[in-house]
Image: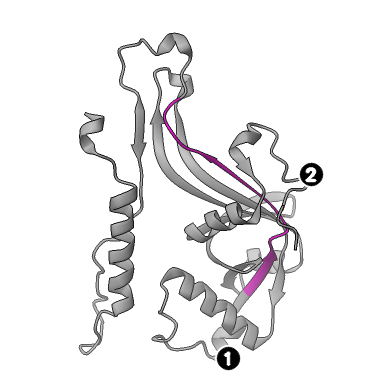
Amino acid sequence: MADSLETERTRLRRKPSRGAHNRDAIYAILDDGFVCHVGFSWEEQPYVLPMVYARDGDLLLLHGAQAGRMFRTLAAGVPVCATVTLLDGLVLARSARMHSVNYRSAVVLGEASEITDHVDKTAALKCIVERVIPGRWRDVRQPNPRELRETTLLALPIREASAKSRSGPPIDYEDDYAASVWAGEIPLVTIPLAPLADTRLAKDSLLPEYVKEYVDKVARGATSFRIPDVKRYR
């Protein structure tokens, strides 16, 4: 399969130097996100709706209620656009016009097809659950036939896509660099907090080790990589 996902529809025309079309760059963004925004048109009205997703190889897996208008429309094979955006920071410049954000985004275009086989649907649901918290699938009750019937699973092939990002400090006009106004970046990061137990939790239910490991791992990564020295921003 070709490494480049560039097509006429995904070619970047504004600031192409910030973009990429290779699978590694695009998949890295998809694998760091939890929510994608899916755009489609129904009866000449555009809609963009958020949903949890997972990537399984060269497929983007989407799931929702069988009765939902969105999934009935998408399952019919209409053109779809799935976008994942990760916000990494606010960029404060010396002029109002040059303010920006640091981000990573990926856009996937194509047509989704419905997964109908029960074994394949179960595998797709497992992929989505494991994407949220690795190790969770083996603990929870597996979906029964009724739940599978009531759930729509869609597979969107990743064949046309692009990635774009911005990082670093503000880019000001040369004449503005002498201005006595603070400029720089405010890094942003999503980190897990202490897990909150459900109020109806069974008394013999213990916090799983994989949850503890997930919280510790992500928190450590965010602290060592994302959060800056506060003194730098005083």
Q: Is residue 33 magenta?
A: no
Q: Is residue 155 magenta?
A: yes
Query: Tag 1: residue type?
Result: Pro
Q: Badge 1 is on which residue? A: 145
Residue 99 located left or right of residue 158: left
Q: Residue at x 59, y 50 (%)?
A: 106
Report the disc number at residue 8.
2
Q: Residue at x 27, y 76 (%)?
A: 198
Task: Note whether 226 is above or below 15 in the view shown.
Answer: below
Q: Residue at x 72, y 45 (%)?
A: 10
Label 1, secondary structure: give it.
helix
- Indicate the position of residue 223 as horizontal and vertical percent values: 28, 52
Report the disc number at residue 16.
none
Outermost residue on the right side: it is: 8
Q: CA gap, disc 1 to disc 2?
A: 42 Å
Magenta highlight range? 153-170
Residue 162 located left or right of residue 177: right
